[in-house]
Amino acid sequence: MSGAEAKTPLIRFENVSYSYGDGPDAAPALDGVNLEIHAGEFIAVLGHNGCGKSTLAKLCNAVLTPSQGTVTVGGLSTADENSLLEIRRTVGMVFQNPDNQIVAAVVEEDVAFALENLGVKPEEIRERVDRALEAVNMSEYKLHAPHRLSGGQKQRISIAGILAMRPACIVLDEPTAMLDPRGRREVMETVHALNRETGMTVILITHHMNEAQAADRVLVMNRGKILLDDTPRRVFAEYDLLEKHALSVPQTVQLTHYAGLAPALDVRECAQTLYKWLMGEQPC
């Protein structure tokens, strides 16, 4: 693979705007966004409700198509109806309410549902379902009824259904919003493992700042525009800008900021940073 090919983005937004209304007074949900997402990245998208996060997510696999500008996936335009099947095979979507995505009475049947509709051969379906359930640590539940599972388990089944399609990218639109802390932890561990172990591109839409700490990149959105796009450390270092837009930061970042120190992205780093500061080893 040449250097030029290696750098070709998996998903590209070029001057993309989207409005939910048709009238001249309709405010754009997305406003002139330019963005490149490369294979293997883990990207967290943050911002208030109504900032354009979910619109961005739905544009990634042609659930929505731009009012202006272009979105391409693997070089294919999402506005081209002939490319929709390939685009949706490339980019899978998981939404916040797993109950809305579960369609079968048995876990393994639910994971197989989309494959059956695509006419995949039965023996290949069996292999894909088993691999997908194994990837989300749900193999032992394959004969269970989905409605008897916890919220976190249901969401992992939803993820397995997408994984069985073997997409290059998975977009998760606030997948932990309806889950308790244990369920959130289960889902986030699953998603990070997929990115780390298989190289799958992950786009995580979230309002939980702490879920963005381990991402490769963080996009902060505000009023349909990208306010910040950088590593978590550099984004959270923009404390005053985030505060100006009423956006919170992880507690570890807040604590080190109050001490006048560089942002700490997790509890261990925060403890080490504060210890060095208290011992006089790190200047304020």
Image (cartoon, grey):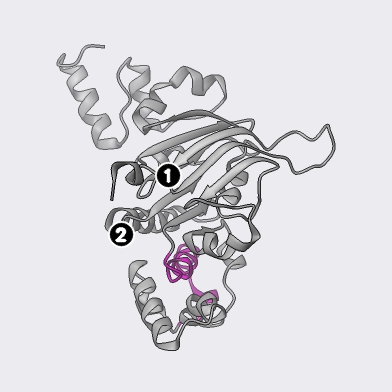
Q: Is residue 266 magenta?
A: no
Q: Is residue 154 magenta?
A: yes
Amino acid type at circle 2 is Thr
Q: Quadrant of residue 117?
A: bottom right
Amino acid type at circle 1 is Pro
Residue at (48, 35) in percent of width and height: 219
* Residue 148 x, y percent position in the rendering: 51, 76
* Residue 241 x, y percent position in the rendering: 50, 19
Residue at (20, 29) in percent of width and height: 272
* Residue 38 x, y percent position in the rendering: 40, 45
SS label for mark 1 = loop
Asked if residue 22 lies left or right of residue 90, the reply is: right
Local crowd size for mark 1, using a 10 Å CA cut-off: few (<14), some (14–19), many (≥20): some
Residue at (34, 53) in percent of width and height: 192
Q: Cβ–Cβ below 8 Å for labels 2 and 1?
A: no
Q: Which residue is mark 2?
A: 198
Badge number at residue 96: none
